[in-house]
Amino acid sequence: MRSIAWSNNYLTLLNQTLLPNRLEYIECHDWQRVAEAIRRLEVRGAPAIGAAAAFALVLGARELTALTMPEFKEKLMQTACALRQTRPTAVNLFWAIDRMLAVFDQLPGNTDTITAVTTLEQAAIAIAEQDEAVNGKMAVHGASLFTKPTAVLTHCNAGALATVAIGTALGVICKAWEQGNITKVFADETRPLLQGARLTAWELMQNGIPVTLITDNMAGWVMKNNMVQAVIVGADRIALNGDVANKIGTYSVAVLAKEHGIPFYVAAPSSTFDFTIHSGADIPIEERCATEITSLGGNCVAPQGVDVFNPAFDVTPNSLITAIITEYGILRAPYNQAISQLVQKCK
């Protein structure tokens, strides 16, 4: 299952807003359509957003080959700026754009625009291929945490749908399932956009992994009754001290896990770490449209005019996190030290 594919000079995205009822793909022939897909959550998940943005820059660059190189660079920077504004929290978006622009800046001064486009395309393909390879490594490291049959709970969707391939948290689950150490997955529905109900449940069923869907406010009772023995989630941004931004509701799950003595794991590639911020207090939290809460399935479920608070993410403090799974291995507290060592490995 792949959420994103590049071929014949255009980008194909699996439209995740239509799942699980319809399996439909979007052909993106210009960067504006990719930006729209990111904003609409037609493509979602931090790693997938990053890869999509990289290919969007390639599409934008293809439109500029008739310009002089100074004009080409100016327009390319404008495209990058517009893409940065599509989703403010997921750091992979900014990481991928910065990596693409760094590749461009390293081109020799006599490079022509067509060569620049080719180089950018190769860089975007490398980002996509790296994501798949990184997820494979994370799956192996994460599966090592599960040494006996375990039922786990997950929140939102951190599977192949949220990445180029394999997934982060669900990648770990799939690997541990193959090894006989996952018995069942409880998936929070993940209000308000139901990524757990629409995407995670569907993805696990496609992989033949037993999954039980619950509402977000059932997680505590499931833990109380010893129905799960671990929690594993993905991430959208991780600060230097190990604070983790993820889909809204993750913090609540972490608090409940701590109360019930259940390990709480985060699976994320190094590209999801923001080495420029010291704590979760510095992470921008996206707020989305009120209708995501006041309507359900196109039907109004709240009084007209009611005030709505709709943050898309929350921040889980490092004190609630048992371990962070990366492609370089498993990080544990003290996270300041562990992540400082990760910085060196990423150079």
Image: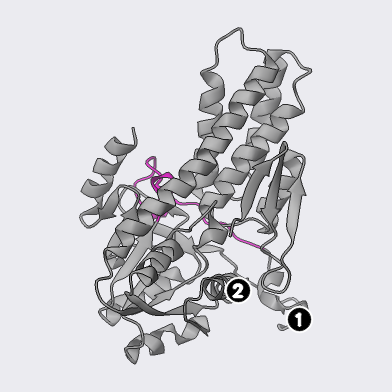
Q: Which residues are magenta?
A: 268-288
Give the percent coordinates (x, y) of residue 35: 69, 46
For the residue labelled by badge 2, is the local secondary structure a helix, a strand or a loop?
Answer: loop
Quarter in which the N terminus is drawn: bottom right
Left/right of residue 261 with respect to residue 220 in the rendered view: left
Real-space CA distance between mark 2 and mark 1, rounded to the nearest whole angstrom: 16 Å
Tell me if residue 313 comes above or below residue 124 in the rendering. Answer: below
- Residue sitting at 39 percent across and 40 percent down? 276
Which quadrant would residue 118 be assigned to in this image? top right
- Residue sitting at 64 percent across and 39 percent down? 55
Disc 2 crowd rating (10 Å Cα; few below 14, some 14-19, many 20+) is: some
Tell me if residue 316 comes above or below residue 133 in the rendering. Answer: below
Residue 318 visible in rendering: no
Residue underneath mark 1: 300
Asked whether 334 or 31 is in front, the reply is: 31
Which quadrant would residue 265 be assigned to in this image? bottom left
Q: What secondary structure characterizes most of the magenta part?
A: loop
